[in-house]
Amino acid sequence: MEFAISLPVLMLVVFGGIEFSRANVLINTAKMAAAEGARRGIVLGTTASDIEATVDNELSKVGVAHADVVVDPPVVNDDTKVVTVGLSIPLDARNGYVTPRFFLGKNVWKITSIPREAKNDAQMEDLLNAAYNNMKGKLNAKAKAAQKALDNANTNSPLAGN
């Protein structure tokens, strides 16, 4: 009798702990991957594909799948003042140890901007804020498009009851 009452609570604690641990790993990995990508991006002549490869390499270390990476600007040249790397990792069965229940449908978002050359504090703050807001809009648009594609796929699924 006691076991039947305590088992659901125990399972909730165990699986909740696993899910929260994986979410924490994804948050920290996203932070490090975006920073490494931005660090790679401040080198003159670096392209968006070079930065995306660096980010993907960092994410693959913990088995992250299907992350969206956005880089601005696409090519780093002499006129580039700030390199911004944004990424979005879906918290779903592809990126979890167990099928998520608490975070299903959520994304981990990280945006990192690194200036290429020193400016005064006011100029740099304006540049970084503009880069952050620009990247936030791009990531939001990508996430909405991915969610719409997923919704369409689920609607057309034979399991949807059409």
Image (tube, helix red, strand yellow):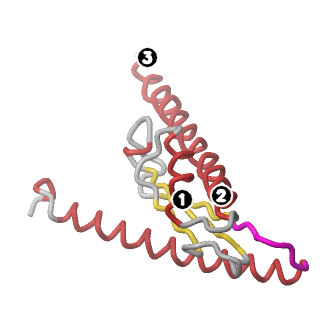
Query: Residue, x 29% and y 63% (percent of image)?
Result: 150
Q: Is residue 150 magenta?
A: no
Q: Amino acid at mark 2?
A: Arg
Q: Label 2: which residue?
A: 40
146 left or right, relative to 17: left
139 left or right, relative to 45: left
Query: Residue, x 70% and y 78% (percent of image)?
Result: 78
Q: Label 3: which residue?
A: 3
Q: How far is mark 1 from mark 3, CA to CA?
A: 55 Å
Q: Which is more toward the observer, 70 or 90? A: 70
Badge 3 crowding class, 10 Å Cα cut-off, few under 14, some 14 to 19, many 20 or more, is few
Badge 2 crowding class, 10 Å Cα cut-off, few under 14, some 14 to 19, many 20 or more, is many
Q: Label 1: which residue?
A: 50
Q: Nearer the viewer, mark 1 or mark 3?
A: 1
Q: Is residue 116 magenta?
A: yes
Q: Amino acid at mark 1?
A: Asp
Image quarter hosting the C terminus? bottom left
**Magenta stretch in the rendered image:** 113-120
Q: Position of residue 93 (x, y in %)?
A: 37, 44
Q: Which is more toward the observer, 51 or 20? A: 51
Disc 3 is placed on an element classified as helix
Label located before the other in sequence (3 or 2): 3
